[in-house]
Image (tube, helix red, strand yellow):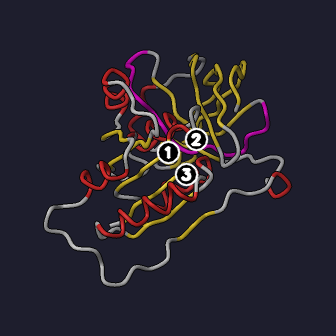
Amino acid sequence: MKALIISEDENVYTTLDEILKKASYDTIIYKWLLKALDNIEEIQPDLIVVSSSEYPRHWKTLVQFVKSGIGGDDVQIYLYEPTPVSAEDEEKAKILGVTGCFSEFEEFGKMVLRPAQEPQAEIEEPVVEEAPSPSEEPAVTNTGHFMFTHPGSQKFISGKYFDYNGKTLSCSFSNEADLSTVKEEMIVESFSFFDSIKVRTASVIIKNIMSLAPSNTFVIVEIKDIYEEN
């Protein structure tokens, strides 16, 4: 089993790593949430634990994207919050798809460790993906992932984009069946797209639906206005 830990705090990710190794998980540690999000399809984790207070703007994007099915099937997602969350906030998180929240590491251990489970005899060093320094970050990237809620059916739709030029994106849908539900000139008021650097939310128009072959159809999306970028 594979576990993804997302935190920049060494004390947090080393402690979580120890707990998950005892539960027989192989672990990968990312200090950069957007990089983890960009690689989630490749990682295909069974469990994700995020230090949500470190990424207040982006953890919800991660949860929604994983729950769309791109990150794997039946992925468990846990949020670590040093300050206990209220029952109301935890319920809201669970509605989004979060498995559970915790503020104490011992509490998390009880969530993932079976009573009869013993620590592994030999624990390998975890894979740690470092966050890049500003000078190492690419200035422009034109590929990544997108997601939006269909304005009519309210179905969650996601996929990959390429050829982003600041005005348009070419989008490949994860579920080909969703292509039949979008029409040219359809307006989507909240269209989120993200790469390893930024999450952007925009209002867009579906401009063209182009079919190159029966299994090769992509959608050209024109950006009306980017109203959130972080």
Looking at this view, is 123 or 107 the one in front? 107
Q: Mark 1, residues whose alpha carbon is within 10 Å: few (<14), some, or many (≥20)?
A: many
Residue 69, percent across and down? 38, 45
- 2 or 3: tag closer to the N-terminus: 3
Who's the residue at 58% across and 16% down the image? Answer: 189
Q: CA distance from mark 1 to mark 2?
A: 6 Å
Q: Let me know if residue 3 is in the magenta part.
A: no
How many numbered marks have been drawn onto this rendered protein structure? 3
Relative depth, front residue between 209 and 41: 41
Compared to residue 38, the image places residue 27 above or below, namely: below
Residue 56 drawn at (x, y percent): 56, 33
Quarter of the image where the N terminus is located? bottom left
Residue under label 3: 7
Give yes or no for contact between labels 2 and 3 (Cβ–Cβ under 8 Å).
yes
Residue under pointer 1: 51
The quadrant in which residue 23 appears is bottom left
Does the CB distance between marks 1 and 3 fall below 8 Å?
yes
Residue at image position (45%, 39%) is: 81
Tell me, yes or no, whether the two marked residues, 1 and 2, touch with CB atoms within 8 Å: yes
Residue type at tag 1: Ser
**x and y percentages locating residue 12 in the rendered image:** 50, 54
In which quadrant will I find the C terminus?
top right
Counting other residues with Cα less than 10 Å from the Cα at mark 2, is it few (<14), some (14-19), or many (20 or more)? some
The magenta segment is 152-166
Q: Which residue is mark 2?
A: 54
Q: Nearer the viewer, residue 199 or 131?
A: 131
- Crowd tier of the residue under label 3, counting other residues whose Cα lies within 10 Å: few below 14, some 14–19, many 20 or above: many
Q: Residue at x 28, y 74 (%)?
A: 119
